[in-house]
Image (tube, rainbow, N blue to C red):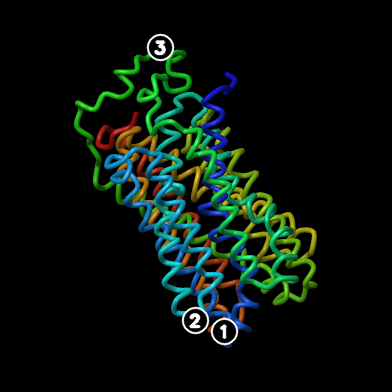
Amino acid sequence: MKISGKYLWVVVAMCGLSMATVGLLTNVAGLFFTPMAEEFGVMRGSVSLTLTIANTCVAVGGLATRRLTKMMPLRMVLLVATAIMAGSTFLMSLVPSMWLEYVLSATRGLAGGAIGFVLITYVLNKWFVAQLGLVTSIAMGFSGLAGAAFTPILQPVIDGMGWRAGMALIAAMQVALCLPAILLVPATDPTDAGLRPFGLADNKQTVSAHHDKSKPIKIDGMVYAGVVCYAVFAAAATAMPQHFPGYAEEVGLAAATGAAMLSACMVANTAGKIVMGWMTDRIGALRSIVIYTALVSVAIVALLVLHVPIVFVAASFFYGLCYGRATVGLTMMCRELFGKRGSGIVYPVAALGTSISNAIFSAALGYAYDLTGSYATSLIGLFVLLVGSVVLTLWCYRRAIMGTGEAE
């Protein structure tokens, strides 16, 4: 089934939001750590705290998404949040102290979270019935693509004109990337624009049945807790790739191997999300998560026992599939277990769990290395969490099938 017309523009607009709110908020932040630390006379850890604050506030902002879209039209939400996010980013290029950078990081994180992954999945759930997994994965995949696409643009600007010029450029990029959503997405729900959700007619459903709000939303608290725990466990693995260069150095491999490992992992970050979306449309989220878990687990074993450059790079690529588990896999798992309406309640909380988990484990893995002198302990711990996450997934689906959860 070919996606075209306004449905295609909705996907394009959501890709733009993904790049603006996730890609430009987090995936290029590392470019600024050193020059900001040098200018303000602080350690790089003090500058990296801006990213921790922003990511935490992104998760908090996501919790307000549904309420905001009910209080005001989607276009107004997008306009206000874009203005706050881009305005805060621009002000970060002007302020003279780190504490003001922290305040502005929190502000742009809250605004970016309000129109980030939670809004993206909410809109796509409303607009698409067929190929929902694919379009969701494409939109989420563009967040990873932003780092690869914009780093070669930003780095020369930072080198030639300073980090403040680079930060101002990010603000302009955020506005440009949010414009398609502001201009081309008429409403959160296609029925408000006189349209059917994509693929609805092909399923021989009616719009009224698809959007029946008279039925109460039933959410099994145990399954809810299981999904949030899955989110925390799954996101823990996404904290490891930033330590790949250090791990390569630890086992005696060249710095170039560490850089290649990180690059391979980021390729899988984007491609793996798209493939997982395609898979969930065909075999469901459960089987897709199990397959991805197996591949990431094999990658961890290879990283632990086969200290060969080409093996490390290949293993890092397959390790990068962990991003798809924590984003697309989580999104589609919520949809299958709780239905379209229930997932709108569960997913924002689960997404909060992924952000907090990534922030905690990013620091925890570093401390574990400081204490043990090796990343092997961290890899073993992440392997255990991977196994735990797939056990939780199987349990959640089993409980839902037995009729205590609500799946659509």
Q: What type is the residue that disc 3 sits on? A: Lys
**Mark 2 burial class by Cα count in 10 Å: few <14, some 14-19, many 20+:** few
Tell me which residue sits at (60%, 81%) in the image.
37
Using the image, determine if residue 291 lies above or below residue 37.
Answer: above
User: Amino acid type of disc 1?
Assistant: Phe
Horizontal and vertical percent for residue 252?
Answer: 76, 76
Q: Are marks 3 and 2 in contact (CB under 8 Å)?
A: no
Q: Where does the N terminus fall, quadrant-wise?
A: top right
Name the residue beneath numbered marker 3. Answer: 204
Residue 341 lies, in percent from the top left, at 31, 34
**Number of numbered tags placed on the structure image:** 3
Identify the secondary structure beneath mark 2.
loop
C-beta proximity under 8 Å, tags 1 and 2 = yes
Using the numbered discs, state the Cα–Cα distance from disc 1 to disc 3 in whole angstroms.
62 Å
Label annotation for residue 40? 1
- Residue 250's place in the image compared with 307, above or below, is below
The percent position of residue 72, horizontal first and vertical second, equals 30, 41
Q: Earlier in the sequence, mark 3 or mark 2?
A: 2
| Mark 1 and mark 2: Cα distance apart in space | 7 Å
Q: Which mark is residue 97?
A: 2
Q: Amino acid at mark 2?
A: Ser
Locate residue 203 relative to residue 408 in the image: left or right. Answer: right
Q: Is residue 263 left or right of residue 118?
A: right
Q: Which badge, 1 or 2, comes first in the chain's sequence?
A: 1
Identify the residue at horizontal 61%, vertical 83% (top origin).
39
Residue placed farthest to the top in the image? 204
